[in-house]
Image: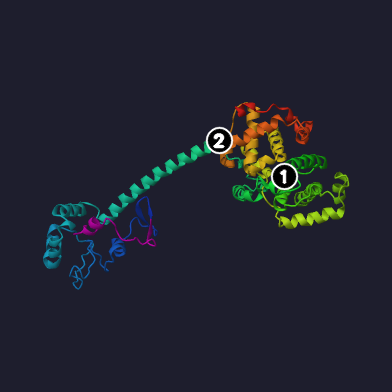
Amino acid sequence: MGGSDENRHGVIGPMNRQQGVLRGGKVIPTNGQTRRALGNINKNIIGAPVYPCAVNKRPFTENNGICNKKIPPVPVHRPVTRKFAAQLAENNPQIHKEETKKPDLISSEALDRIITDVEEGDFNEPMFVQHTEAMLEEIDRMEGIEMEDSNDIDVEVEVSVMDIDSCDKNNPLAVVEYIDDIYCFHKKNECRSCVPPNYMENQQDINERMRGILIDWLIEVHYKFELMEETLYLTINLIDRFLAAHHHIARKKLQLVGVTAMLLACKYEEVSVPVVDDLILISDKAYTRTEILDMEKLMANTLQFNFCLPTPYVFMRRFLKASQSDKKLELLAFFIIELCLVEYEMLQYTPSQLAASAIYTAQSTLKGFEDWSKTSEFHSGYTEGTLLECSRKMVGLHHKAGIGKLTGVHRKYNTSKFGYVARIEPAGFLLL
């Protein structure tokens, strides 16, 4: 009877956490004792009276017919013997009757085993505490195995994916704590900076060829003004978004749209902004100051003053860091992606995909074989297979970079300032 509750239910009542804590499967008291008093344990577990019983009885309910009977408590120092158990059954015939009805609660062999354990063992440590300790030790052992397995997985991930921000942990401008969240936000919002790849169909007086001429010219203007790289990418983004939203742009106003977009981009990105008179001068005085300012108002209102959107440049910087690039790889990747800015057909790709494909193409061009590391794949979110289509088109643009009329990008990168990367042979093997 002493172990019937535990054998039947397999669980014990909640421990009082204010009395002690569990460590390594054992109850450790907070008052410095090696073991809590048995009275406290029994009181917490089975709600025992002032003098706790050594026998863990079932709770008295109306169902077992003895809810009104009071069983005298057994002192804690009194051992449980066969004689005592028999006397207890004689004095409480209803308990004996109940046990007869439900013989599966405890057998005679189990009773012998329980009595022997109590007589031979340490009586200050009840059976259910010993059982709990063994169970908790097993749980601790299993948790240790799981922790070892998880550590092995972490090691494998760390080996294949480098921590590219470890060198900038002491640099507050690198915002290492937030950099992953920032680029996750950029990835989610880059679709807002995209335009329909066929928006020119809605324009009546201009076409994609005229757009290419305008952007090729603006790349040269940007280079001569020595503006920041971010300004160029934002300028082209503003042009495409405005033309996609405003469907009635006359051919003679297209250059005005270009210089006004550069003015807005400079106001957003540059510290020293070119004055309007400089823009009038580079456009060969084709427009007046009033026309530029009026177009500025129209463009800002059409775009709802939304200039803070991710461009390919934003992703280029992050992906180049992930690829552990050197100066030559960086220059070649920017040469390739600026070729894409001129081409209308490349609007079908998102900014992040353009950036990743440009770096993948540049790596393959310099190394002579396809190369895309796990670190680059992890930080860009693109596998090598998802970049091949875009990369092959970039190789085609690289082949014809110095041919035809739109050679502004080729001339820019065919200088000592940009390491003459325009002279590098394209990765023709990617086309096979």
Residue depicted at x 87% and y 52%: 288
In primary-sequence order, the first of circles 2 and 1 is: 1
Picture layout, residue 13 above or below residue 149: below
The image shows a total of numbered marks equal to 2
Q: Element at badge 2? A: helix
Which residue is nearer to you in this view: 373 or 100? 373
Residue depicted at x 13% and y 57%: 82
Residue depicted at x 30% and y 65%: 43
Quadrant occupied by the N terminus: bottom left
Residue labelled with disc 1? 233
Residue depicted at x 17% and y 56%: 104
Q: Is residue 129 left or right of residue 403?
A: left
Give the extent of the magenta segment.
1-21
Residue labelled with disc 2? 385
Which residue is nearer to you in this view: 237 or 23? 237
Quadrant occupied by the C terminus: top right
Q: Amino acid at mark 2?
A: Gly
Which residue is nearer to you in this view: 310 or 251? 251
Q: Amino acid at mark 1?
A: Tyr
Mark 1: few/some/many CA within 10 Å (<14, 14-19, 20+): many
